[in-house]
Each structure stands twice: as C-alpha cells, then as structure tokens.
C-alpha cells in the first residue's frame, strides 16, 4: 500500500489516498476531484482548470502521467 496526497496528484489539498497500484490511486484522486467539483471548492476548481489546460496537449499530459506513475512506484510500501 502506498500513499500520495491530492497535491501530489495535481490537486489542491493534503488529503491522503492509499492504494496498491497507480491505477487505483488515480481512481481515488478522480473520485475526490468529482466530489470537490460538486462542492464547488475554489482551490480544487483552480487545480482542475490547470489540469484541463494540460490535457489540451496530449504529449504533455502523457509526460505528466508518466512522471506521477514513476513517483508512485518510487514510494515505499506502507501500511
């Protein structure tokens, strides 16, 4: 089990996500993002805007995704 924060995954807060795989981590982050979107949290909405800009460039988005996956894989396993 590895831990990453919302901020580490491009978000706006220090909420921790715990997952066995990067795919699980991404899904937890996505669910949190949707929850914050529904709550209209200003900091998260700003972070989502930055991510939407990044998504306009598929190569940049792929590079970002790969860097986050490497960051996840480099983390120590915790409880």
Image (cartoon, rainbow, N blue to C red):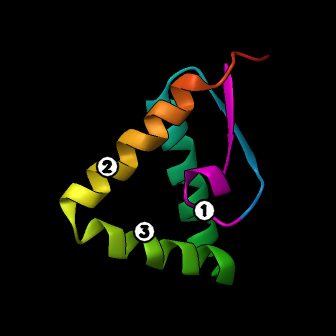
Dot 1: element: loop
Residue 44 falls in image quadrant: bottom right
Marks 1 and 3, the one that precedes in the sequence: 1
Along the line of sight, which residue is nearer the eye, 33 or 12? Answer: 12
- The span shown in magenta is 1-12
Q: Position of residue 19 (x, y in %)?
A: 61, 27
Residue 6 lies in the magenta-colored region: yes
Residue 41 visible (yes or no): no
Q: Position of residue 51 (x, y in %)?
A: 42, 68
Tell how many labels: 3
Residue named by callout 1: 11
Residue named by callout 2: 63
Q: Position of residue 75 (x, y in %)?
A: 64, 25
> Quick check: 52 left or right of 78?
left
Q: Do residues under tags 1 and 3 come within 8 Å of each other at their CB atoms?
A: no
Residue named by callout 3: 51
The residue under the point 31% across, 49% down is 63
């Amino acid at each position: 089990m590895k831990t990453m924060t919302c901020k580490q995954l491009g978000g706006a807060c220090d909420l921790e996500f715990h997952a066995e795989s990067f795919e699980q981590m991404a899904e937890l982050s996505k669910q949190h993002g949707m929850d914050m979107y529904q709550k209209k949290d200003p900091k998260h909405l700003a972070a989502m805007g930055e991510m939407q800009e990044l998504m306009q460039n598929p190569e940049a988005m792929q590079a970002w995704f790969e860097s986050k996956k490497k960051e996840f894989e480099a983390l120590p396993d915790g409880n």
